[in-house]
Image (cartoon, rainbow, N blue to C red):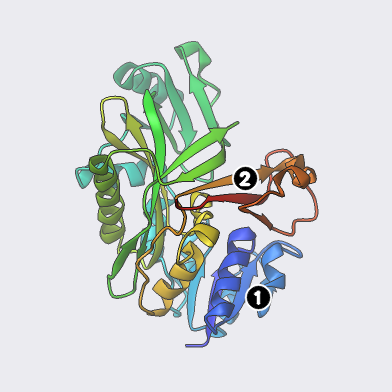
Amino acid sequence: MTTIGILGAGQLGKMLAEAAAELGFKTHVFAPDADPVAAAAATHFTQADYEDIKALQKFAASVDVITLEFENVPVAPLKKLATPIYPSPAALEISQHRVREKTLANSLGIETAPFAAVRSPEELRRAMETVGVPGILKTCTLGYDGKGQWKVATPADAPPLPPGDYIYEGFVQFDKEISVIVARGTGGEIQCFEPVENMHRNHILHTTTAPANISAEIAAKAIHTATTLANALEVAGLLAVEMFITRDGHVLMNEMAPRPHNSGHWTLDGCNVSQFEQAIRAVTGMKLIAPKRTAEKVVMTNLIGDEVNHLESWKKPGAHIHMYGKKESRPGRKMGHVTILSPRD
């Protein structure tokens, strides 16, 4: 195997390509964007729409295996490709749809917030009656960083519903938000990064702290949740699972993404193996590395929008600044991140 195909060309694709190069692989990035940040790190770049089957087939023929940097790639065209795709289109169909992923979790005995599928104003009314208010209405696909979400405090707050699939979730009083990233090889080998604690600002991840301030029992339950989902989906690559810890100690699966994740960026500087190297190892059949944190505490902070213009305040001992190379800063756009390492005593 010599060349890895990557669908998507943002900062996650860029860091995947850099990790692949360090392991001796070439990369071919495919995305509809013009001049994306991952193109500079990849060996080859194809600009084409994800629905362009001829371009996809040509791309697939040029690589040995295909992986991805984000899960919202149309599944139907991928099913027509002969090249191995990790994670599989079947795993994508579940993980890119909120009702399907929560239904799977419940079928495996994994707790979630109470929820109901919604496709019409009448179904939303019934969902509010059965699940209760307040709640959160979300699009089933494509929503992230707070996009496609509406808090519903009373029935009068319900927004107009264009045609589509939605999920209505009961409001959860949680104590912490955590995530676990699990790597699973093509043969089923599993390695987990430790649970980390996440804090959001304006619905966008603000900081990730490793390790999470949780009990050993909660940590074990979170890792079990992530590995159970990865095995059920037969993921090859990474699966990031976001979870709520309730005040009475329940672990609720919130969302999952079969790709590198923002909450795993701390591993670039604070772990013996980064999530990106582990992802490349997983999809190419290489042996996975048992992750070990290399500092007493690691805090990753996202640089959002014009925060990128104030880097001087971050230049301090133990700080590692990562810039993504995006030419334009916009409100809510991730421009880079800073990782602060606290050394062990």
Rendered location of residue 118, percent (x, y): 40, 31
User: In the displayed structure, does residue 322 sit left or right of residue 144?
Assistant: right
Q: Residue at x 40, y 72 (%)?
A: 282
What residue type is disc 1 on?
Ala
Kindly identify which numbered label has been placed on residue 52: none
Kindly identify which numbered label has been placed on residue 302: 2
Q: Residue at x 47, y 55 (%)?
A: 295
Camera sees residue 310: yes
Residue 81, placed above or below residue 303: below
Q: Residue at x 37, y 48 (%)?
A: 195
What residue type is disc 2 on?
Asn
Camera sees residue 73: no
Number of labelled discs?
2
Front in this rendered view, residue 339 or 223: 339
Kindly identify which numbered label has been placed on residue 42: 1
Front in this rendered view, residue 247 or 50: 247
Label 2, residues with CA under 10 Å away: few <14, some 14-19, many ≥20: many
Rendered location of residue 214, percent (x, y): 33, 38
User: In the displayed structure, does residue 328 sit left or right of residue 176?
Assistant: right
